[in-house]
Amino acid sequence: MQQSAITRSTLRGRAGALGFGITLTLAAATSAAEADSDYEIWAIDQGTNQVHIYNPALEEVARIDLVAEGVRTAHMVDFTADHAYAFIASPGSGDVTVIRSADRAVVARLATGPRTHMATASSDDSRAIAAVIGAPDTPGDGKLIEILVDTANESFTIGRTLVVAEDPLVQEKAERFSETQPICQEFTADGRHAYATLGPELGEGGVVVLDLESFQLVAAYPVDEVQASCGTVRTGNGRHMFVNGGSADVGVFYVFDTSTHRVVHQADTRGKDAHGVWPTPDGSEIWMVNRVTSNAVVIDAETFEITAEMDFVGKTPDIIAMSPDGRAYISLRGPEPVTMPHVAIGETPGFAVVDVAARELIEVIQPAEGDPKSDFHGIGVRLIHD
């Protein structure tokens, strides 16, 4: 379940807002190692609720203990355009935690609802959107929730809410939507729309497109039209949106024209359980991993054709983030996965380091090696600006 594109994250670097304390270990935020770096890797262990922060030399320079904040199952991370703030969505505690990146301070926790899966910031940092799967015993509880962002005043508050099942476009096809649970989302380049996949099971999949002005849907595709249940990523030129879906037996991706919100391409991912997806720093390629088969494919961002395949990028790869120096960082699941256990059993919880140009696995980092609870999921690259 991956998002963001070169035009936003790669190059740019909750019931109410409350102040919370923070626990730092290993190194201060102003450590020499960090000061000499131009980016950081934020890797989230959802099994232990720790955020492990590494520099490009693959040295751990800081750690954020989210257990102390009451967070459970810290799942996904995204940053504001200037990378000054991080949004961490946590399905276990049903909230979005906002962290000031420079000093790792938690500045807000917003109660967004049961099984909050992901929060994504818009390019202009005016808002974020949270995908909320909803309560497991409440059909039709899935929501897309707006978070109003005012970085000048360090204010983060809940805005509008859309219950997906109640939108007129979904109601027109209600018998074809088995569930309406948002999973991952990404904004279009102009910030007018957001694409969201549904899931988390492939049979519960589909895609909806949210208009940010009206906060209603302008397109809705049930799973019999689009088998998407996971990742979303915008191409560098903003003209297309990739979405994917998968299960123990399926790996598939689709490409939407963002001007018409229609599918213009569909293909197999040459593996099972298509999951994390990310653009290369120059925007020419889209990388996608298959969680069950532990492989990855490289897709031409213009022709949408698969141009290369890596047979192994680490056992049970989940989410991808890329750095400006041409590395892919891929989170790896643990042997006792907290989420999606039937397809996500791993062996080396942590993250893989892959050379993008060489298409070669360099190293596997295990920050909590030996801890049976360790289960990495969300990962992000934070650019450090002077």
Image (tube, rainbow, N blue to C red):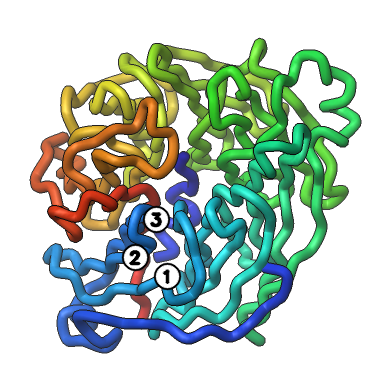
Real-space Cα separation, disc 1 to disc 3, in angstroms:
25 Å
- Counting residues from the N terminus, which is met first, the one under dot 1 or under dot 3? 3
- Check the image and report above or below for 258 versus 255: below
> Of 349 and 324, which appears nearest the observer?
349
Q: Which mark is residue 66?
A: 1
> Which residue reaches farthest left?
362
What numbered label is drawn on residue 220? none
Instruction: State the residue at coordinates (21%, 83%).
Output: 27
The amino acid marked with disc number 1 is: Leu
Percent x, y of residue 197:
61, 33
Instruction: Please state if 278 lies on the left or on the right of 367 as rendered.
Output: right
93 to the left or right of 42: right
* Front residue of this view, candidates 386 and 141: 141
Q: Is residue 235 left or right of residue 36?
A: right
Local crowd size for mark 2, using a 10 Å CA cut-off: few (<14), some (14–19), many (≥20): many
Q: Are marks 2 and 3 in contact (CB under 8 Å)?
A: no
Judge depth for marks 1 and 3 and give the one in front.
1
Q: Which residue is mark 2?
A: 50
- The residue that label 3 is drawn on is 10
Residue 233 position within the rendered picture, expressed as x and y whole percent measured from the top left: 50, 39
Type of amino acid at the residue the image marks with label 2: Gln
Which quadrant is home to the C terminus?
bottom left
Residue located at (58% from left, 85% from top): 19
Give the alpha-carbon distance from disc 2 to disc 3, as whole Å: 23 Å
Asked whether the beta carbons under mark 2 and mark 1 sit within 8 Å of each other, the answer is yes
Are the residues at dot 1 and dot 3 in contact (C-beta closer than 8 Å)?
Answer: no
Residue at left offset 52%, top offset 64%:
87
